[in-house]
Amino acid sequence: MWTGRRTRPGSKNREDLIVDDEMRGMLLHGFGKEWLGSLGDHASAVTAVNVEVLSASGLEERAMSEILDSGGSGVFHETGAKVLVFLGFTDNELSRFIDGYPSDVPRPIFCCLTAENVNWSFDRLIVDLLEEDRYWKERSKKERVDQGECS
């Protein structure tokens, strides 16, 4: 069971997030075991605390809160949609983690656990993240075209 940062049961308010300043975690989806060492080492170097790495693979229909309470699936395998959910990271740690992300590790869609998404199924989270990712990529491409950078 991961207990670093989660919402009190039944709550949807951001103020009700429970935070343990000594706990950090990452909930992964779509990563094989070969990437765990690099990701865990990078996260621990950024946070200066031990970072627990959990998997949502095989539990996509469950709510994020259930996945976290169960300690994840323990199954790490490659899939198309790679997602990394930060658990308990500070804003500074998030920036440092993303800016220094290992170049030899496939880049996922990053997100944070929130009081809103903690009760979503992981499938719903993936759909939402893929929609956001597509939006931002299209917007960036449009801005480059508008500025004459590409055709």
Image (cartoon, rainbow, N blue to C red):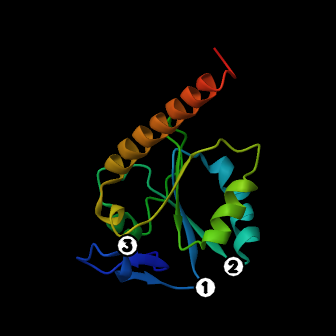
Quarter location, residue 22: bottom right
Above or below, 123 against 98 in this view is above
Residue in the image at 59% along x and 45% along y:
32
Residue receiving disc 1: 22
Q: Nearer the viewer, mark 3 or mark 2?
A: 2
Task: Identify the mark nearer the N-term, 2 or 1.
Answer: 1
Q: Quadrant of the N terminus?
A: bottom left
- Residue 111 lies, in percent from the top left, at 50, 56
Q: Which residue is mark 2?
A: 49
Q: Look at mark 3 in the image and give the residue it sits on.
A: 69
Label 2, label 1: how far apart the Cα atoms are: 7 Å
Q: Is residue 71 left or right of residue 45?
A: left
Tell me which corner region of the image, top left, top right, bottom left or bottom right, holds residue 117: bottom left
Q: Could you tell me the amino acid type at mark 1?
A: Glu
Report the amino acid beneath label 3.
Asp
Q: CA distance from mark 3 to mark 2?
A: 21 Å
Image quadrant occupied by the C terminus: top right
113 and 70: which one is in front? 113
Q: Which secondary structure, mark 1?
A: loop
Other-residue count near label 2 (Cα within 10 Å), few / some / many at <14 / 14–19 / ≥20? some
Q: Earlier in the sequence, mark 1 or mark 3?
A: 1
The residue at 69%/23% (across/down) is 149
Task: Say if mark 2 contacts mark 1, CB within 8 Å.
Answer: yes
Number of the label disc, if any, that sits on residue 97:
none
The percent coordinates of residue 55 (x first, y second) are 49, 57
Residue 49, percent across and down? 69, 79
